[in-house]
Amino acid sequence: MREGAQAVAKLVITLAVMVFFLFPVYWLVTTAFKPGSDWFRWPPMIIPQALTLDNFTGGGSGIYGGGGGTTAIENIVPYLRNSVVVALGTALISTFVAALAGYAISRFKIGGMPFVSWIISVRMLPPIAAALPLYVTFRLLHLLDTWWALILVHLTFTTPFAVWVLISFFNEIPRELDEAAFVDGATPFATFWRVVLPLSAPGLAAMMTLSFVQSWGEFLLALILTSTARAQTLPIYLGRYITGFRVAWGPLAAAGLVTMLPVVVFSLLMQRYLLRGLTFGAVKG
């Protein structure tokens, strides 16, 4: 009897948590397909009575409910391309640099704890504190409104966290494997590349996923360092639907859905490695 009550309580709590976290996603999806007349209805419609593709195609009532076809996500392609290039570039470079740094610190104690503490302290710096110096620096280097400007600044907050996690990950890999490779005549880099790196695949995949997600959603520095569709990313594109006059909920939700899908697909593809990488060594000892 008591076990049955506990099972029911767990089920209720699980359902409550699922509703709490999944309802915003449900609301985003349904709003993306609601006609303009339902965007501002009160009380809001939990289950829409009519569905439309106008928020995606630009037809129908327009951004302010007054006509015009300027609300489409037809112009989202350049921003989607910029986000993919910047997030993927940041994830790849950040993981590569963090793997080299993490291995060097883990195995050879380069810099010691003061160096490790300094690395993670960089992650604590609020982005707004570095915005003005970065803007002046990139202007002098003619990097404003380019992909490289965003990739470089995104590396400053993704790489320290990746280094910090990968140090612990490399510490869990037995040093005897390195020593066996050294005995066989392998150099430190060959040992890292052929022995340690394959064993670290789950941790590297986890860090690549987290770096991709962090870079994908970054808004503040992208707003300051870019000014045109040449380099602006999706978070900046979404902001155009929020004005001082009214929020275009339908197109905003449609564009938000397009923004969310690549991250969901990427995370699902990396899910197996993500779970193993983040829990590696968690139950040891």
Image: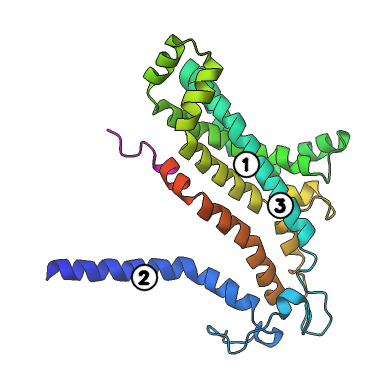
The image quadrant where one finds the N terminus is bottom left
Which sits in the foreground, 214 or 118?
214
Q: In percent of the image, x 66 and y 82: which residue is there?
A: 39
Q: In percent of the image, x 56 and y 25: which residue is there?
A: 101
Please say if the residues under marks 3 and 2 sit with CB atoms less than 8 Å apart.
no
| Residue type at numbered disc 2 | Leu
Q: Residue 63 appears in which quarter of the rendering?
A: bottom right
For mark 3, what is the residue? Answer: 83
Percent x, y for residue 137? 82, 34
Q: Nearer the viewer, mark 3 or mark 2?
A: 3
User: Is-magenta flag for residue 282?
Assistant: yes
Looking at the rendering, the stretch of residues picked out in magenta corresponds to 278-285
Q: In 3D space, how far apart are the residues under numbered discs 2 and 1 (Cα atoms)? A: 34 Å
Q: Residue 43 appears in which quarter of the rendering?
A: bottom right
| Residue type at numbered disc 3 | Ser
Q: Main secondary structure of the magenta part?
A: loop
- The circle drawn on residue 91 is 1
Badge 3: residue crowd in 10 Å (few <14, some 14–19, many ≥20)? many
Q: Nearer the viewer, mark 2 or mark 1?
A: 1
The image quadrant where one finds the C terminus is top left
For mark 2, what is the residue? Answer: 15
